Amino acid sequence: MRLPLSSLLIILLFSGAVYGADSDAESRIKALEEALSDQQKTINELKAQKEGGRLRLIDISLDALFSAGGSTEGDESLQSLQGGGHDPRKRGFTVQNVELSLSGAVDPYLKGEAHIIYFLDPLEGETVVELEEAFMTTTSLPYGLQLEAGQFFTEFGRINPQHPHQWHWQDQPVINTRFFGPDGMRGPGFRLGWLAPLPWYSEFHVGMQNANGETMASFLANDELFGERPIGNRPFVQRDVDTMKDLVYLARLDNSLDLTQNVTAKVGLSGLYGPNATGEAGETGIYGADLVIKWRPGYQERGWPFIIWESEVMRRDYKADAVYDDSDPANVIDLKKETLRDWGLYTQLLYGFSPGWAAGLRYEYATGSRDSVGGRDNDPFRDDRTRISPLLTWMPSEFSRLRVQYNYDRADHLDDEEAHSVWLGVEFMYGAHAAHAF
Amino acid sequence: MRFIYALLMLSIFSTASFAEVNVVATLPWIGSVAKEIGKEKINVAVLVKSGQDPHFVEAKPSMIVAAKNADIIMYNGLELEIGYLPLIITSSRNPKIQPGQKGNLDCSISVNVIEMAKTDLDRSMGDVHASGNPHYHLSPDNVLKAAKTISERLSSIDGGNSDFYRSRFDIFEKGLREKMKEWDERMAPLKGKKVILYHRDMNYLMERYGIGVVGYIEPKPGIPPTPKHLQSLIEAGKREGVSAVLVNTYFERRSPSFVADKIGVKMLMLPIDVFGVPEARDYISLMDYVTNAVKEGLR
C-alpha cells in the first residue's frame, strides 16, 4: 500500500513540476499584465490629480455686437425703418447687443440658463439692461417630454426664439419687428415640448405666457410701448388679467427630415392666440410657417462650404375693439370694431463659399389690409414694405465675425418711398457658450 | 404610397430591434469597434461622417432622434465633440444617456493621452484642449483600451450577454495584437524620419512609430495658415529634412501641397477615420491602409 501511494505522490510532484514550467511562463505573463494594469491605474490617478476633473458649476460667455454705418434716412426715421431694438439704427455707431449668458446643470433633473443683455439707446445714449431670458429646462421627464419654465422667448418661427447673435443678418426681418416688437416676443410662462415617438424628428410645443409687458407688442403690451408703436394707431386700453383667457397661448409643430446625407430640411408651423390692448373684446391671432434647408457636404473644412436657405411667412389677425371717447370734445375718438390683417415674409440664402467666408441675399415683403387711423400708408409698422439686403460675412475664427450689409428699402411711409443704408458689423464672443439648435 | 411603405418599414424595423442594445457612436471608428464587440447583439448608429471635421459638426435633428432611442451613447471625449454633443444629449430627453449615467460612455477614460497642457491655456492659442490631444484613435494601444471600456460597459448595461461581449473582446484583442505586430514591422524602418502635419490629428501614430513632427500647416490648432507661417514651415522642413507632408483627407490641399512642393517632398492624403477611403471598412483595415500609405509615402 505504501509504495503505490508514495509513487503516486512522486508522480503528482513531477507532473506538478512539468505543469509548473508551463504555468510559470503563464503566471509571469499574468504578473506582467497585472503590473502593467497597476501602472496604468497609477498613470490614470496621476492624470486625475493633475487635471483634477473640474466641477463645472456655471458656464459664462459674453457676446458683443457693434455696428457702424449710415443711411439716407435720419436717426429719427431709422427708429421705425430699422424696427428691431438690436438692429443697427443710427448714423455712426450702434451698440446693438452685449449679451451675458450663464448656463449650467441645476441638479439631476434640471438645467438652468439666463441671458442678460445690455445696449445703448441709440438716441439718448442711455444704457439699457434687459432680462432677456432666465429659465429652467427639465432633462429627464418620461415619454419624450420637456418642460421649460421662467422668462423666455416664445417658440414662434425661427427668428423670434433666437438671440441676436444667432441671426445671419445684422437686423431682424421687418415682419418680426411688426408682430413681435423691437425686442422679440418673450415673457414669463411655461412651455411643454413633446418629441413624438416617430422615426423622424417631430416635436410639438404648447406654451402659455403673460400677455402684458413691453415684449408682448401684438397682445396686451404696455402703455409706453403702445404709445411708441400703436397698432393701427389706436389708443391704448389698460386691461386686467381676470381669467385664463387673458394669457397668450402658443402651439408649434416642428418636423425635420434628412433629404439626403448632406441635405436636411426643417419645417415648422406656429400659432399664437391672446388678448390685445384695444379693449375688452380685442384679441390677436398670429399664424406662421417656416422652412429651413441646409446643405453641408460630406467633405467639409472647418464647416465650409455650406448653403442655408431659410424662409418664414406669417400673418396676424388683430381684432381691434370699438373705442368711443368724448372726454375731449374737440377730439372725439369713435372707432369701430374691425380686424386689421397684416402679413409678410422673408426668404434668405446664405452661401459659405470658402472657409471663413459667406455671402447672402435676403428678400422681405410686408403688407396689410384695413386702414390704420391716419392711413396705412403713413403707418411705418403697417405700410407696404419691401427690403432687399445683400450680405458679406467674414469669420476669422468661430468666435469673431465681420459683416457688411446693404439694405435697399421701399416703404410707403417714407417721404421719397426709398432708403439706402449700409451697415458694417463687428461681433466677438468669449467664454463657454452652449451650441445652438439646428 | 411608397412613402407610407417606407414609414411602415421604418417603424417595423424600430420595433424589431427591440431586444438589441441601441448604440449611438459619435465617430465612425467608435461605431466600428463597438460593432466588432457587440455584433448582432447591438444596433449601431454613427453621427459624424468620416469626411467631416469632428470639431465642426452641427447637431442635426436626426441626431437627436438617434440619441432619443439610444441605450448608450459612446463618444471620443477630451472635448472633441463639445460643439454639438451636449446639445444632442440634452435635447434627446433620454435619461439613460445623460452625463454620469451608464449609457453615457466617454471612450477616453482609460486611454493614454499625450500633449496634456502643462501651462494655462486660452483661446489666443487656437482651439486648444487642456486635457490633451483628443485624436488618440490612431494609436492601436489606445483603441484596445477603448474597446475594453466599451465591452465592459456593454456587459454592464446588457448583463445577459456579458459573456458574449467578453469573448468578442478577446477575439478583437487577439486580432488587433496580431495586426499590431504586422504594423510595427511595417513601420519600423520609418523610425527617426520626420514629417509635417496639417493638424495635430496624427500625433499618436507618429509617436508610436518614432516619426518626428517638425511642424503643422495650421499656425495654431483650428486656425487657417498664413503665408508667413508657411514660409517658416518650408524653411524648417528643409532644415530638418522632412520626408513628407501628411494631410487628413478633409483639409484643403492648396497650402500643404505648396509647402510640400517647395520642400521637394510628397504630400500624402490620409483618411483619419473608418470609411475615409473605401478600403477602410473597419478599424483594422483603416490602420492597414494608413500604415501602408505612410510607409509608401515616406520611403
Image (cartoon, coloured by chain):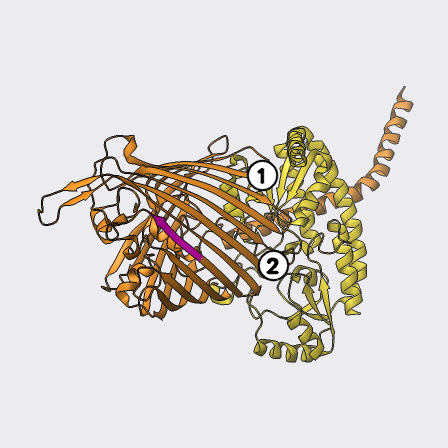
Q: What residue is drawn where x is 42% and y is 46%?
A: A314
The picture quadrant where one finds residue B252 is bottom right
| For discs 2 and 1, the disc positioned in front in the rendered view | 1
Please indicate, yes or no, whether residue A107 appears anywhere in the rendered image.
no
* Closer-to-camera residue (A354/A77): A77
Which residue matches tag 2?
Answer: B114
Pointer 2 chain: B
Residue B26 included in the magenta stretch of the image: no
Most common SS among magenta residues? strand
Q: Which chain is yellow?
A: B
Image location of residue A73, percent across then percent down: 31, 68
**Mark 2 touching mark 1, by CB under 8 A?**
no
Residue A366 included in the magenta stretch of the image: yes
Q: Would you say A61 lies left or right of B293 here?
A: left
Q: Which amino acid does label 2 sit on?
A: Ile
Q: What residue is drawn where x is 71% and y is 32%?
A: B163
Q: Which amino acid does label 1 sit on?
A: Trp
Image location of residue B270, percent across then percent down: 72, 62
Q: What residue is drawn where x is 30% and y is 47%?
A: A215
* Closer-to-camera residue (A186/B156): A186
Which quadrant is home to the N terminus of chain A?
top right
Q: The orange chain is which one?
A: A
Q: Give the range drawn in magenta.
A: A364-369
Which residue matches tag 1?
Answer: A200
* Closer-to-camera residue (A317/A51): A317
- Assign a secondary structure to mark 2: loop
CA–CA distance between discs 2 and 1? 40 Å
